[in-house]
Image (cartoon, rainbow, N blue to C red):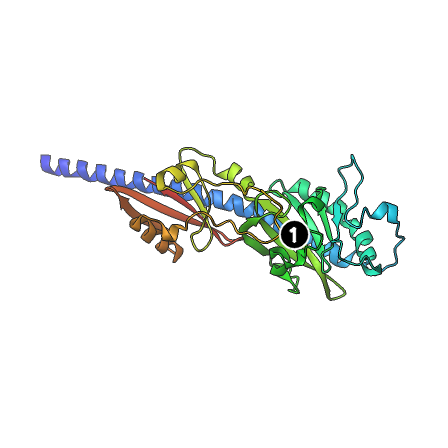
């Protein structure tokens, strides 16, 4: 009888322990999925709002209508115009080697209608640093106002850069977003960014793009500051975008470093100066990460006899992975 009672007691303890462990694991996964869901929700809202601006720019602006052009008001050395002291205007820029012809004058004047939408868009999306329209002639309208002329060479072709090339002559699809999801150096001095991009058409002819730029540091500051947990954001290949301080310390991952602008950027520079987890120096971590990249939702591994568990959640909008490691 005593043996039976003892066995029942042991069985109860083991069952209770297993349930607690499962609850703990479930809580870790629930928490991770919650963070991933919030990040994805922010990105989806940016995409949705940019589509609305794109629809307006596509169907509500008569780009071919005649305009009253005023050289004193509309240009300043054929580079940019602005009203000092006002916050409700974009900067405009046209490379000096571009001919300011009748077509471009219409584009510059008519595209000013987008300014009010730009203001609302940036106010509604706190993650966004800037939003801009870029046409096929490298004419740029960007909000908030930035003195972009000091970042550019006289003959820069903005249409050669990642955001424009991402959607060049691609269709505007209502339920699809184009993302430059690999962080790259912002041309206007705002550090590492990603971009949500939409093509703009007028009467079925491609006329340019709209792009919303999101600094990686905004994501870092909101989601990766907890000193007591290991969270790591990677792309689909395991390249680290950012991590919490504990993730950096525990797994020898360099902390996120902003791009330092020693001189103006005139070409595309990708962020990847930090190692890929798929090529991590620790073989056991590396093997676990590669299984995660192949689709596993959870992997265990050991370092110095200490057990680690990796959970993963997907951020579908940008095809990223959010990893949590517990030990």
- Compared to residue 202, the image places residue 87 above or below, namely above
Q: Quadrant of residue 9?
A: top left
Compare residues 10 and 124 and report the one nearer the observer: 124
Q: Can residue 1 be seen in this view?
A: no
Disc 1 crowd rating (10 Å Cα; few below 14, some 14-19, many 20+) is many
The residue sitting at 22% across, 39% down in the picture is 14
Compare residues 167 and 101 and report the one nearer the observer: 101
The residue sitting at 75% across, 44% down in the picture is 90
- SS at mark 1 in the image: strand
Residue 47 on image: x %, y %: 62, 51
Compare residues 153 and 168 and report the one nearer the observer: 153
In the shown orientation, is residue 141 left or right of residue 241? right
The residue sitting at 35% across, 55% down in the picture is 291
The residue sitting at 75% across, 53% down in the picture is 94
Q: In which quarter of the image is residue 293?
A: bottom left
- Compared to residue 135, the image places residue 142 above or below, namely above
In the shown orientation, is residue 243 left or right of residue 75? left
């Amino acid at each position: 009888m005593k043996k039976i009672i003892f066995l029942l007691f042991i069985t109860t303890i083991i069952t209770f322990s297993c349930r607690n462990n499962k609850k703990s694991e479930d809580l870790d996964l629930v928490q991770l999925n919650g963070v991933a869901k919030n990040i994805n929700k922010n990105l989806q809202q940016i995409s949705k709002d940019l589509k609305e601006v794109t629809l307006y720019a596509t169907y509500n602006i008569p780009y071919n209508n005649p305009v009253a052009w005023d050289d004193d008001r509309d240009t300043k050395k054929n580079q940019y115009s602005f009203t000092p002291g006002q916050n409700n205007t974009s900067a405009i820029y046209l490379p000096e080697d571009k001919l300011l012809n009748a077509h471009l004058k219409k584009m510059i004047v008519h595209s000013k209608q987008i300014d009010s939408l730009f203001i609302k868009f940036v106010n509604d999306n706190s993650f966004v640093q800037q939003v801009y329209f870029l046409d096929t002639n490298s004419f740029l309208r960007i909000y908030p106002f930035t003195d972009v002329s000091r970042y550019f060479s006289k003959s820069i072709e903005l249409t050669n850069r990642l955001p424009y090339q991402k959607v060049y002559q691609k269709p505007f699809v209502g339920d699809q977003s184009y993302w430059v999801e690999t962080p790259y150096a912002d041309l206007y001095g705002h550090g590492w960014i990603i971009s949500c991009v939409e093509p703009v058409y007028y009467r079925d002819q491609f006329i340019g793009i709209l792009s919303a730029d999101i600094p990686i540091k905004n994501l870092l500051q909101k989601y990766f500051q907890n000193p007591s947990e290991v969270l790591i954001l990677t792309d689909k290949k395991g390249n680290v975008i950012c991590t919490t301080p504990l993730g950096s310390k525990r797994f020898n991952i360099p902390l996120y470093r902003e791009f330092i602008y020693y001189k103006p950027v005139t070409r595309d520079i990708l962020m990847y100066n930090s190692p890929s987890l798929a090529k991590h120096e620790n073989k056991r971590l590396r093997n676990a990460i590669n299984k995660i990249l192949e689709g596993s939702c959870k992997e265990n591994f050991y370092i110095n006899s200490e057990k680690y568990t990796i959970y993963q959640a997907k951020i579908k909008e940008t095809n990223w992975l959010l990893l949590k490691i517990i030990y």
